[in-house]
Amino acid sequence: MSVAPNILMEKRREISIIRMFNNWLKRFAFQTQEMFFFSVRMVVAMFGRPFYFPEVREQTFLIGVGSLYLIILTGIFAGEGFALAFSVELADFGAKNYLGRIMSIAIIRELGPILTALMIAARVASGITAEIGAMKASRQIDAMRAFGIDPIRKIAVPRLIALMLMVPALTILCDAIALLGGYFVAVFIAHVSSTMYWSAVRDRLIFGNIFIGLFKPVVYSFLIAFIACYKGFSSTGGTKGVGRATTESVVLASITILVVNFFITRVVFTLIKGWL
Amino acid sequence: MIELKNVSFAYDERPILKNISFRVDPKESLVIMGPSGSGKSTVLRLLLGLEQVCEGEVLIDGQNICAMKESKRRKLRRKIGMVFQDGALFDSMTAGENVGYYLLEHTDLTPQQVEDRVQEMLGFVGLDSGEVLNALPDQLSGGMQRRIAIGRALLSAEPQIMLFDEPTTGLDPPATEKVLDLIRKLQEEKPIATIVVTHQIVDAISIAERFIVIVAGELIFDGNLDELRDSRDERVNHFLRPFRESFEKVNRRQFVRKEP
C-alpha cells in the first residue's frame, strides 16, 4: 500500500532536481549570452564618438597612481619570498648562481603579470563594481541615459582604456621590484654575487619571455574591466545587491585570471616555443 | 504628441502593464495615480525608452521610441526632461554641475556660459545659487535636491515634455508645497506637457487637469477631476476610499495661482 506514494515522491524529487538543473542551465546560458553582448558593446564603444578623455585621464591616475604602493609591496615581498625559497633549494644542488635565471623566467613570465592582475582585480574591480552598482541603485545610470548619454561609453570605456594602459605598466614595475627583491635575497642571504645575479637575469630577458610578460597583462586588464563593469551594470537588489555584485566581481575576475593564465601559457608555449 | 497604444510590459515573465493606451497633447498636464507597485513609474520608463515594451507602441511626436536604435532614441530623449524619484542626482558632482550636466555634455558653451545658465536656472527653481552652486547633493535637503533635479531636467535641450516620478515623496509639507509650486510655475510659464506620477491624491489634484488611475497594471480611469470624483467604477472607488475625506475637502480653486 505504501509503495505507490514512495514511488510518487521519488518521481517528484527527480522532476524537481531536473527542473532546478534546467533553470540553472537557462540562467547560465542567458548570463553567458548577456556577458558576451556586453563585452562586444564595450569594445565597439571604445572606437566610437564621443571620446571621454577627461574620464580616461582621471581613471588612469586613480588606477595607476592609486595602485603604486600595492604593487611595490607585492613586488618586493613576492620577489624576496620566491628568491628565498629557491635559493635554499638551489644551494642543495650547488646551483645558487642560477637563481637569477629562475627569478627572471618566473617573475616576468608568470608571477609579475598574475600578482599584478590579482592585486588590481582586488583593488580596482571591487571599486568599479561598487561605484557602478551604487549609481545604478540610485538611478544615476537611468538619469545619464535620460540625458542622451551612453553609460557604457561614459563609464565603462574610460575604465577599460585606463586598465589597458596601467596594468601592463604596473606589471613592468612589479617585475622590476620583484627582481630587485630577489637581488637583495640573492646577495645578502644566499651570497650570490651581484654581477652573477644580474647577468643570469639578463640571460633570460629574451623576446619570448618579454612578449608573454606584456601580452598577459593586456588580456587581464580587459577581463578585469569587463567583469567589474558587467557586474556593476547588472547588479540588482539595492545596497545588498551592490555588496553581492562587488564580491562576485572580485572572485570571478581572480578565478578568470588564473584560468586564462593557464591557457595563455599553454597556447604561447605551443606557438612561440622557439623563442622561449 | 505622446501616445501609448495597447502597451503591455512584463518583467521576468511577471506582467507589469496590461494593454495600456492613452494620449497626451502638447501643454497638457496629466497625473498618473495608483497604489505602489501598480506600474506607474514603468509608464515613464517606457516613455523615455529606458525599458523595451513587450507589445504595443510608444509614440513621441509620431515616432515609435520602441522601434528605434539606441542612438536615435538618445536624440529623441533630448525632447524629454525627467525628474526621477529621489532626484537621482550625480552624487560625485556639485549641484551646479548637476544642473549644467546636459550643457557640459552636449554643447560647446564655455564654463562661464554654462555657469551663467545654471545660475539663471537655480533662480527659476527658487534656489540661492550662492548657497547651493558648489554644494554636493548630500549636503542639501531633500526638497532642494528635488528642485535641483527639476532644474537639471529643464536645462536639457528645451524639453517639450516633463516627466516627474513621485516628485514629492519623502518631503515635508513646506518642501512638498515648494516643489508643487514649481511644477505649477512650469506649467504656466513653459510651453511643455507634464506627466506626473504620484500616489498623493491631494498633490495630484493641485497640478493636473487630467487623471489616469492604474491599478495592478491596468488603466482603470482616464478623465478630469469631476469625472474622477463621480466615478462609479468599483476599482476607482476602492483606490480613492482611503483618501476620500481629504479628496472631498479639496477645493480646486485654492490651487489656482493668484493673479499678480
Image (cartoon, rainbow, N blue to C red):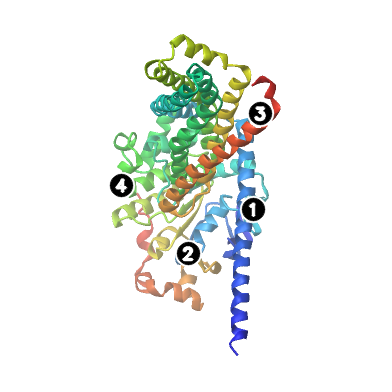
Residue B12 visible from this viewpoint: yes
Identify which residue is drawn at 45% across, 67% down. Answer: B35
Percent of width and height locating residue B13: 60, 63
Q: Residue B37 carries which label?
A: 2
Identify which residue is drawn at 37% across, 43% down. Answer: B125
Tag 1 subunit: A
Q: Earlier in the sequence, mark 4 or mark 2?
A: 2
Q: Mark 4 points at which residue?
A: B141
Q: What residue type is labelled 4?
A: Ser
| Left or right: A28 in relation to A84 | right
Instruction: Kindly state the secondary structure of the residue where label 2 is placed.
Output: loop
Tag 4 subunit: B
Percent of width and height locating residue B37: 48, 64
Q: Are marks 3 and 2 in contact (CB under 8 Å)?
A: no
Residue A148 visible from this viewpoint: no
Instruction: Kindly state the secondary structure of the residue where label 3 is placed.
Output: helix
Task: Give the residue at the far top of this rendering.
Answer: A195
Identify which residue is drawn at 59% across, 81% down. Answer: A6
Task: Kindly report which numbered mark, 4 or 3, lies closer to the viewer in this rendering.
Answer: 3
Disc 4 residue crowd, few under 14, some 14–19, many 20+, Cα 10 Å: few
Label 1 and label 3: CA atoms lie apart by 32 Å
Q: Do the residues labelled 1 and 3 touch (CB within 8 Å)?
A: no
* Discs 1, 3: same chain: yes
Q: Pick whichever, A266 or B44, lies toward us.
A: A266
Q: Name the residue under label 1.
A: A29
Task: Kindly report which numbered mark, 2 or 1, lies closer to the viewer in this rendering.
Answer: 1
Q: Earlier in the sequence, mark 1 or mark 3?
A: 1
